[in-house]
Image (cartoon, grey):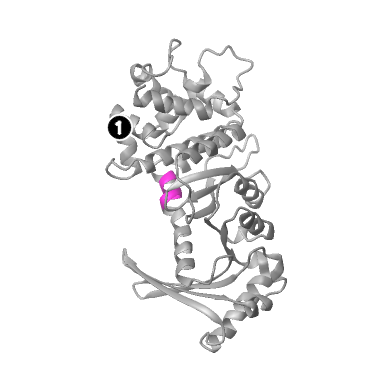
Amino acid sequence: MTEVEAAAATIEAHFGHIEDPRVDYLIIHPLINIMTIALCAIIAGADTWADVARFGQSKQSWLSGFLNLENGIPSHDTFSTLFARLEPEQLKSSFISWVKTIHQRLSGEVVAVDGKKLRHSFDNAAENPMITMVGAWATEAELVLGQEKVANGHNEIPAIKELLPLLDMAGCIVTIDAIGCQQDIAAMIIDQDADYLLAVKGNQENLQDDIALFFDLAAQNDFSRVNHTYARTVNKGHGRVEVRQCWAIDGEDSLQFLRNHQVWSGLKTIVRIDSERHIGNQVSVQTSYFISSLPNDAKQILAAKRAHWGIENRLHWVLDIAFREDDARNRVGHGAENMATLRHMAVNLLKQEKTGKGGIKAKRLQAAWDDDYLVKVLSGSMR
C-alpha cells in the first residue's frame, strides 16, 4: 500500500461511517470521495466549494490513483449541497476520534478553550445569525482537539459544556476566559483528572470582589503574611515592551476569605496577573484575577496563561489569514459549521508536517504545487 493509499484508508476508517444525507438523490459520487477531495483541496488552498471542485478537476488524474472516480469529479453544487445537509455532530465526532489517533497523550499540555466567530456566516434572509465555534487547542502540540457550535440565542457556556466531556484531557491544564468561570465547568475539568485556570470577571461578581480585596490586603504587607509565589516576565518586540507579574496565593485563610469557596471543585489557588504594556511614551496596565486547581506555582500559572493567549495568533490568526475564514460565505444549512471542521482538520495536518518551509499559507501553496508534499501532509500525522 502506497503512502497516499494508507492516508486515504485512514480517512475511510474514521469518516467512512458517516451517514450520507443525500437520501433523495441518485448518488453517483460516494461520500468518502467527496470527503477526501474536500480535505485535500482545503489543505492545498481551496477556500470555497467552487475552489474544491476546481481542485478536483485539475487533480483528477492524481486522485484517481487512490479513489474510484469512474463518475468523474463532483460539481461545486454537489459539494455545497452535501455539506449543507451533512449532520455536523457526525463530522465532529469523527474529527475528535481522528485527532485522538494523531497525537500522543497530552499530559501536561495547556488546552486553551475559546470561541471564534465566523463573521460572514450570517444569513439575514433566513434570519440565521453569525455562527460562533468554541474550539479546544492543545498549545504545545498545536492541535485543534475538538469544536462545538454555539447554539443560536445562547452564549458559549452550553457549547463549552458539550465539548469538554468529548476530550481526553487527563493531566492537562485547561484555560478558559471569564465566560467559562462556572462551577459545573470547573467540576467537569476536575472529573477528567485535569486542572483548570479560569479567569474571574464581573459574571462572578462576589468572587471577583473577594479575590481583589484579599490581594489588596495581602499587598499592604508585601505578601509577607500569606503563602504566595511570584513570577515576572518581560517581552520586547515590534516597538513595545510587555511586563507581566503574577502573584499566586493558596492556603486555608485565602480560601475561607472567599464567599462560598467550597462550591468550586478542586480550588487550591487564587491568582492576580498585572499586564503592563509600554508603546513609546504610553503605558497601559491591566489587572486580571483567576481561580485555579493548580498548586501554588506562579511561574507555571503565568506560563499557562501566556499559552492561552497564543490561541489567538497560532490558531485564530491562521484561520483568518491563511484560510480567509472571516471572508467565508457558507450560509446554507450546516455548510459553515462543516467547512470550519474541515479547516480544523487541515490546520492539524499542516501544523504536524514539519519539513515544509514557511508558515501555513506557504505550506498550502506547496501542497497545491507538489503532489508528493500533499501526500506527506496527508500521511505524515496519520496512524
Highlighted magenta segment, given as a residue range: 314-319
Quadrant in which the C terminus appears: top left
Tell which residue pokes out farthest to the bottom in this image.
221
Residue 131: tell me if it is visible: no
Give, as a three-letter code, the residue at label 1: Tyr
Q: Quadrant of residue 61?
A: top left
Q: x, y (%) of residue 23? A: 63, 17
Q: Position of residue 320 (x, y in %)?
A: 43, 45
**Residue 212 painted magenta:** no
26 up-or-down from 368: above or below: above
Q: Specify few, some or many for label 1: CA neighbours under 10 Å numbering under 14, 14-19, or 20 or more.
A: many
Q: Is residue 115 visible?
A: yes
Q: Is residue 355 left or right of residue 56?
A: left
Residue drawn at (46%, 49%) of the image: 316
Q: Is residue 86 left or right of residue 43?
A: right
- Residue 194, given in percent of the width and then of the height, sits at 57, 56
Majority secondary structure of the magenta segment? helix
Q: Please give the residue where the numbered disc 1 appears in the rendered image.
A: 373
Q: Position of residue 270 (x, y in %)?
A: 58, 72
Where disc 1 sits, the SS reads: helix
Front-most of 138 and 43? 138
Above-or-below relation of 47 to 58: below
| Residue at image coords 42%, 32% | 42
